[in-house]
């Protein structure tokens, strides 16, 4: 059946953040096309979305022809597909580069060829590296210390190059520590909150690497989705890079405490050796994004409560 809905491509649309973006796009009346190879994404993440509003292409973002096919007819692209693990990038810099940088170039080139209006890219706070100045501002020098961070930065730079040189509008969102439903807890390098929650519902104490005073700018996935949808069409967003964090740091001890409080447990964290290469604190200056009208709405406590409820329902 013919449709006059605008089609939006979401690479990695079966993944953690991508599936939430797809859901929000469909709610706003867009048609979402998903390109995902299900390496970490899951079809069950999009199972609740009405099938007439989505198209799912199972394929690889590293394959140029596949990306060209996926992008044709799309006005916007959210490029979320990536190997989201720093340690995997350290173990296999060549393999991850093909995905975390090579695929971005594929997307940009196909966007240029097929006249996509705007590409929104899932960047990372990893581009700041371990330089201790806080909060992180977008204008600060970047100094990534892992292949993951370098690929994210290279992708940003190429995106801005396509913006200036070829007129493909490009926006980079540097995600801080995103948490929420559908974040996979199964690897030791999954987001710490997903791991803690997974253990908690099994009544197992969290393991904290180090003293637990290290802190992160945890941001709930629905606020990250709101940031994506805001910069998708905002006239002042094109050609720019924005931090996506709440601008508040929460320590791991506080997370463990909040989780006990929310569930009535009194699990004492088990402390182990600090994780090599860990940064101590991370916090975003989000002035640029809030100036566009973004306001993170979900507190850490409310986000944790929602997440625990979702995990308990699924269990
Ligand atoms: C985040 C991003 C990563 C990259 C990086 C840039 C996530 C999931 N990862 O890594 O993609 O952008 O920032 O700096 O958002 N921890 C424990 N116990 C556990 C698991 C983790 O104590 O069971 C600690 C870990 O040692 C670290 C903190 O929790 O101090 C956060 O770890 P993470 O893997 O959730 O995120 P991070 O900040 O290392």
Image (spheres, grey):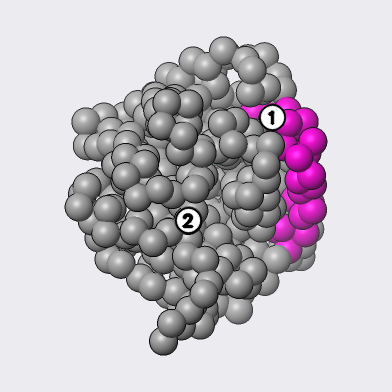
* Residue sitting at x 44%, y 74%: 54
Residue corresponding to mark 1:
283
Give the magenta-colored segment's residue range. 281-305
Magenta stretch: includes residue 298 = yes
Tell which of 24 and 72 is nearer to you.
Answer: 72
* Residue sitting at x 45%, y 38%: 168
Q: Is residue 73 above or below residue 269?
A: below
Q: x, y (%) of residue 191?
A: 52, 47
Magenta stretch: includes residue 195 = no
Tell which of 88 and 18 is nearer to you.
Answer: 18
Give left or right: position of 42 versus 285. Answer: left
Residue 3 visible: yes
Residue extending farthest to the bottom is 1
Give left or right: position of 251 versus 165. Answer: right
Residue 186 visible: no
* Residue sitting at x 68%, y 22%: 137
Q: x, y (%) of residue 105?
A: 32, 36
């Amino acid at each position: 059946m013919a449709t006059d809905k605008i089609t939006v491509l979401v690479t990695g649309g079966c993944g953690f953040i991508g599936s939430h973006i797809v859901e929000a796009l469909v709610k706003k009346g867009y048609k979402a096309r998903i390109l995902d190879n299900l390496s970490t994404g899951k079809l069950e993440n999009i199972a609740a979305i009405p099938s007439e509003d989505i198209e799912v292409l199972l394929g690889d973002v590293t394959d140029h022809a596949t990306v060209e096919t996926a992008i044709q007819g799309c006005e916007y692209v959210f490029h979320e597909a990536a190997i989201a693990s720093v340690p995997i990038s350290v173990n296999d810099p060549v393999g991850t580069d093909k995905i975390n940088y090579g695929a971005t170039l594929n997307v940009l080139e196909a966007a240029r060829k097929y006249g996509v209006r705007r590409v929104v890219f899932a960047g990372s706070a990893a581009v700041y590296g371990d330089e201790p100045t806080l909060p992180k501002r977008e204008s600060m020098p970047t100094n990534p210390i892992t292949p993951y961070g370098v690929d994210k930065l290279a992708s940003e730079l190429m995106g801005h190059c396509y913006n200036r040189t070829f007129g493909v509008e490009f926006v980079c969102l540097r995600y801080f520590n995103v948490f929420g439903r559908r974040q996979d807890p199964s690897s030791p390098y999954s987001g710490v909150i997903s791991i803690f929650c997974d253990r908690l519902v099994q009544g197992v104490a969290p393991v904290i690497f180090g003293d637990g005073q290290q802190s992160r700018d945890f941001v709930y996935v629905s606020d990250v989705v709101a940031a994506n949808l805001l910069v998708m069409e905002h006239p002042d967003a094109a050609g720019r890079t924005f931090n996506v964090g709440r601008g508040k740091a929460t320590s791991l001890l506080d997370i463990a405490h909040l989780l006990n409080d929310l569930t009535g447990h009194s699990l004492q964290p088990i402390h182990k050796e600090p994780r090599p290469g860990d940064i101590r604190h991370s916090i975003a200056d989000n002035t640029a994004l809030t100036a566009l009208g973004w306001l993170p709405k979900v507190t850490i406590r409310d986000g944790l409560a929602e997440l625990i409820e979702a995990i308990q329902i699924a269990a």
